[in-house]
Every structure is written in structure tokens, then in C-alpha cells.
Image: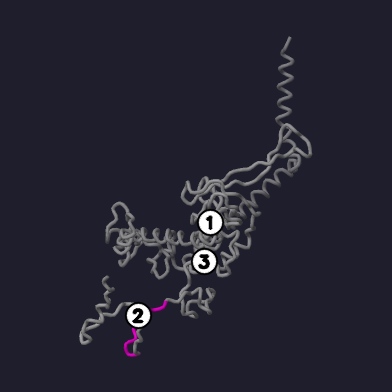
């Protein structure tokens, strides 16, 4: 029988003077001299992990950036926020005006439901809420109501819900048929909560809403600048995939909103606003261009003449009234008799006419 041959690795047969092969694992475990130490990769500091992270501090008193949620919560939105976004918000870094609005909003009652359909619509599930139904046939104290339910479409921003989950809802009008949003998972069914996408908190929903509104206001401002002929605004809109507008060109419309006659001598017929700040009024024109301005002495003399005219007219009226009073006194009539005569005159005349008509009948 042949004996087993001695097997030696090829590495032992090679010459030691040649270059020896070393595996990557050995290279990784070899000691490296300080002179050959590689540069460490830059470490990104997480603001949430920083021990001194305080979003309430102003920007000049902190050396770190705020998280996107805190950034938009702290930024003031120049319009009224819907009350449903502020009902359950607890962030202390909101703008003072937004905090004042939040104090006037009251929270609604707790709403608990069960998910009965999930995965058929994107970011939308169907939830069943327990309720009671009035019995129209049996009118007894014990059997007045029967257990019933209502189904609602609920907004699920991160697709975190599964069929069978017991969840809490918040009222939020997302669309015409979706009027609720998931607040938290009370009891999960199947997959644990840790293995699912997180459910946004009320402050997260408020930050997302403000972010969308700021983006819309930015697009509105860009379109306004583009209509005035700003080349930068037109380029930004095109980079965003938006149409700047029909007939919008760079440099076209830059002077559309400027007042006529800017840089020239302004007159009331060239569109200038008379009486504006820093504007010299033409000679003989008041602010507004309605009345001519004369000298002070001339205006005073004119006003004095009007006063004398009115006083003379008043004296003539009094003299005429005195003469009429004397004539009535000579005839033995006073003011009351004159008034009574005016009232009774037509009645006497009518009675005479009535008598003559009756007398003419056979």
C-alpha cells in the first residue's frame, strides 16, 4: 500500500526574498505607526444628541443648526393657521402670535377606532368607530339604543397602520372626504410599533403644514418678480419645473409698476400725486390739486365781504318781518288767528259748496 504523501503549502516552498502575500484581514489588524495614521472621517453632530441643544435660543447664541421641524415651528407664518393644526400642539417655541391663537383653541374629546381596511389606498385607511343607534320601534329604557358603528377615511401620512390596529384619531380636514388623521397607535396588531414607520406628532404635522405654506408663498413671490421681468426669478421657476407664465420674458415689464414721470418734472397732468412727500407743488395749487391758492390778504378780504353780505341780508329779513307784524296788528289779527284762519278757510268753502249742491236737488 502506498503511504500518504506529505502535503506542504506552496507558501513554504517559495523564496523568502520575494514579496510575500498578506490577506486583507491581517492588514487591517496590523499596528499602524502614528505617522501613518489616516485622517478620521468628519463627524456630523446630531443636534438632538447635543447636550446643549436648545431650540428656543436665538441664532447668534447657538453654534448648531435647528432640526427641520424646530426650524419651521419657530418661523412665523404671515397668515392664520387652521385651528385643527393647533388643537393638540404643545411646542413652546412657536411665535407669540401663534401661541396666542393656540390658547383660544380647545381640544376635542378622545376618538378611538379600529382599522378595518389598510393598504388599498396610499396614506389613507378605513377606520370603524363605535357608536349607538336609536331604535325607532322599541321605546324602552333598556332597549332604546343598539350598538352600531360608523366608518371614516383616516389620513395615514407614513403608511404606518395595519388592519386590526386600535388607534387614536385627531380631527383634521385633509381633503373633501378625509376629515381625520392618525394620532397614535394604541394597540398594534401583528407587526410591532418599533418596526413600523413613526406616526407624526401634532407638532410634526404643524411643521409640515408651515413648510408647504412657505414654499407656496415663495413660488408666489417668484411669479410676481418674473412678471416684472426678473431673469433670476424666471430661471428659478424653470429649475423648479414651473411655467413662469404666458408672455413673461427677462427685462419685459420692469417698468410696469413704476409711476409715470419718474425722474422727470412732474405736473398734475403727468400722473403725479399732488401733495406727495418730497414733491414741490406748482404755484397756486393746494395738496390734491383741487383749489387755487391765493394770497392771505386776498382770501381774508373775500371772507370778510361774504360775512358783511350775510349780515346785511339778515337785517333786511328782520325789518321785513317787523313790517308784516305791524300790518297784522292794525287789522286786529295775531299769529294764532292767522294760523286758525288758514286751517278753517278750506273747510268753510267746502261746506258752502256742499250746501249749494244739496239745495239744487229737487
The residue that label 2 is drawn on is 28
Q: Nearer the viewer, residue 226 or 58?
A: 58
Asked if residue 37 lies in the magenta stretch, the reply is yes
Asked if residue 94 lies in the magenta stretch, the reply is no
Q: Nearer the viewer, residue 185 or 216?
A: 185
Residue 276, position as x, y percentages in the image: 42, 66
> Please, what secondary structure does the residue beneath circle 3 have?
helix
Residue 9 shown left or right of residue 55 in the figure: left
The residue that label 3 is drawn on is 73
Residue 267, position as x, y percentages in the image: 34, 62
For the residues labelled 1 and 2, the Cα–Cα distance comes to 40 Å
For the residues labelled 2 and 3, the Cα–Cα distance comes to 47 Å
> Please, what secondary structure does the residue beneath circle 2 have?
helix
Q: Nearer the viewer, residue 76 or 42?
A: 42
Q: Report the magenta residues as a range.
A: 34-43
Residue at image position (32%, 65%) is 262
Check disc 3: other Cα within 10 Å, few if <14, some if 14-19, many if 20+: many
On residue 191, the disc is 1
Amino acid at each position: 500500500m502506498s503511504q500518504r504523501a506529505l502535503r506542504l503549502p506552496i507558501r513554504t516552498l517559495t523564496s523568502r526574498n520575494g514579496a510575500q502575500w498578506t490577506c486583507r484581514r491581517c492588514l487591517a489588524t496590523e499596528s499602524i505607526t502614528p505617522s501613518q495614521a489616516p485622517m478620521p472621517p468628519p463627524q456630523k453632530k446630531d443636534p438632538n444628541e447635543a447636550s446643549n441643544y436648545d431650540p428656543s435660543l436665538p441664532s447668534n447664541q447657538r453654534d448648531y443648526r435647528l432640526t427641520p421641524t424646530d426650524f419651521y415651528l419657530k418661523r412665523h407664518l404671515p397668515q392664520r393657521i387652521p385651528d385643527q393644526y393647533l388643537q393638540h400642539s404643545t411646542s413652546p417655541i412657536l411665535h407669540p402670535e401663534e401661541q396666542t391663537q393656540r390658547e383660544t383653541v380647545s381640544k376635542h374629546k378622545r376618538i378611538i377606532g379600529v382599522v378595518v381596511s389598510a393598504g388599498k389606498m396610499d396614506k389613507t385607511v378605513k377606520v370603524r368607530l363605535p357608536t349607538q343607534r336609536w331604535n325607532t320601534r322599541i321605546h324602552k329604557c333598556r332597549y332604546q339604543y343598539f350598538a352600531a358603528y360608523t366608518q371614516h377615511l383616516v389620513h395615514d401620512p407614513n403608511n404606518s397602520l395595519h388592519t386590526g390596529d386600535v388607534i387614536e384619531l385627531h380631527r383634521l380636514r385633509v381633503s373633501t372626504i378625509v376629515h381625520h388623521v392618525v394620532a397614535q397607535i394604541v394597540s398594534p396588531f401583528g407587526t410591532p410599533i418599533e418596526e413600523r414607520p413613526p406616526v407624526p406628532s401634532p407638532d410634526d404635522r404643524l411643521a409640515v403644514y408651515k413648510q408647504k405654506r412657505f414654499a407656496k408663498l415663495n413660488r408666489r413671490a417668484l411669479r410676481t418678480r418674473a412678471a416684472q421681468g426678473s431673469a433670476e426669478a424666471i430661471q428659478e421657476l424653470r429649475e423648479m419645473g414651473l411655467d413662469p407664465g404666458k408672455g413673461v420674458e427677462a427685462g419685459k415689464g420692469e417698468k410696469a409698476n413704476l409711476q409715470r414721470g419718474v425722474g422727470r418734472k412732474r405736473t398734475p397732468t403727468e400722473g403725479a400725486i399732488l401733495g406727495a412727500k418730497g414733491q414741490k407743488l406748482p404755484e397756486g395749487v393746494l395738496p390734491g390739486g383741487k383749489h387755487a391758492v391765493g394770497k392771505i390778504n386776498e382770501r381774508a378780504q373775500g371772507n370778510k365781504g361774504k360775512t358783511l353780505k350775510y349780515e346785511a341780508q339778515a337785517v333786511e329779513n328782520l325789518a321785513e318781518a317787523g313790517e308784516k307784524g305791524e300790518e297784522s296788528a292794525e287789522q286786529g289779527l295775531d299769529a294764532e288767528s292767522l294760523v286758525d284762519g288758514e286751517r278753517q278757510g278750506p273747510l268753510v268753502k267746502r261746506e258752502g259748496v256742499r250746501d249749494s249742491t244739496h239745495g239744487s236737488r229737487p
